[in-house]
Image (tube, rainbow, N blue to C red):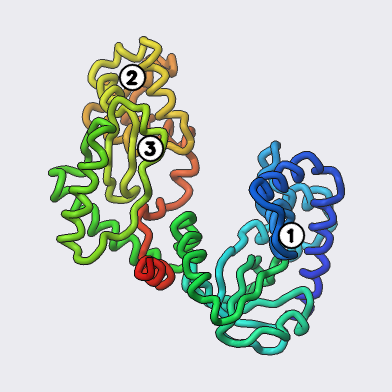
Amino acid sequence: MMTMLARAVELKAELIHFATSGRFERELGGVLARFYADDPPADEAAAFLPIDYFAHQHLLASGDTVIDRFLRERPGLARAEVELLSSWKDVVEGVYEVRVVDGAAVRLFNLVDELVYRAFSNLGEAAFGELRPGMYVVGRLVPLGLDWLISGTPAVHAAAARDTLLPVAAHIALEHPAWVFRNPVLLTRARELQSEQRQCFIGHFGADLVVLRPSELPDRMRGYLAYQSGRLGGAPPTTRELPVQMEGAETVALIFDEVAGLGYYADFAKLEEVFLDPGLVARRPYRQLVSAYLRGEAVSPVPIRRLAERDPEKAGAVFAKLLNKRGFDWERSGELLLRSHKPAHFTARPLPTVIPVTEAIAEHVGAA
């Protein structure tokens, strides 16, 4: 481990030097400006955060990361070093409670995902001299084999800061649900909650798909959440907020899919019209809408699938006209079409749209 740690420390220093060497001056400047838009950094930890983020995670204009560029310019690295650097694009951010301090290692309990991380520092044992069980560390970790390396400069807080840090952890969990789902137990619980909520949705609305006017949404959602609370008991689990782009739509569909969860889809009624009358796709507004649903990488394939299932022959006619491909057959080529335009939705099972109530969220909500 210490050999790997020593090499990781060297690679980390080389990566940061590469990121700040001047070749990325414009893009790094943009990241710094965004991080410091409101206030200058309060301390060393805050000052180094955007640089660490830029080196590990920021997508450059070319679509790759600084780590990708670094690896291309260092073809002589050993395979293990390439794998280590590549793994550093997966950064774990969190609010960590110190559980154990053991020489050069520290065990940290992340309030965001409720997992324990055994972490090391590039400073060795000296980095943990002031830490005691019960204290808190706010920072970032990157993989180090089966263990973790502290990335950047963490902020250290006394145990008495717990009440102040709980809202921070809760905010991170609610803003970044994928980070919560690193914990397989929480992921399983979220899928169970999602299934329970879907049954409540169907019980309230009569189906897992309902089309509303935007003005109806607030009252109808309040009614649904009250119904759900009554059926499941207590406060309903947190769901994602209504996207702001729905506000200008004529209609909004709420589809609570068994796998993809609850999604909101703008102008769904207009989209339905095209799949009932494929000739409408020749009209520009309808054509643009179908194209946006198909080509929008962030748009789930669920609404197109639902409409195509109603009448595959008409769905084939819609895309034959849209793509100018005579004889396009939905049942033969529809799935391939969706995969080609929305690859990210097919690489893994979709994460739940329901966030389980972790201890941090529960305590934060309870104190609010």
Quadrant including the N terminus: bottom right
| Residue drawn where x is 69% and y is 37% of the image | 61
User: Disc 1, disc 3: CB below 8 Å?
Assistant: no
The disc, 2 or 3, on the residue closer to the chain's N-terminal end is 3
Marker disc for residue 318: 2
The disc, 1 or 3, on the residue closer to the chain's N-terminal end is 1
Number of labels in the image equals 3
The answer to which image quadrant residue 101 occupies is: bottom right
Marker disc for residue 271: none
The answer to which image quadrant residue 229 occupies is: bottom left
Q: Where is residue 199 in the image (x, y as percent from the top left)?
A: 19, 54
| Residue drawn where x is 22% and y is 52% of the image | 225
Marker disc for residue 48: 1
Quick one: 138 or 344, which is closer to the camera? 138
| Residue drawn where x is 55% and y is 76% of the image | 161
In this figure, which residue is indicated by the disc labeled 3?
301
Determine the secondary structure under disc 3: loop
Label 2 amino acid? Val
The disc, 2 or 1, on the residue closer to the chain's N-terminal end is 1
Label 3 amino acid? Pro
User: Disc 2, disc 1: CB below 8 Å?
Assistant: no
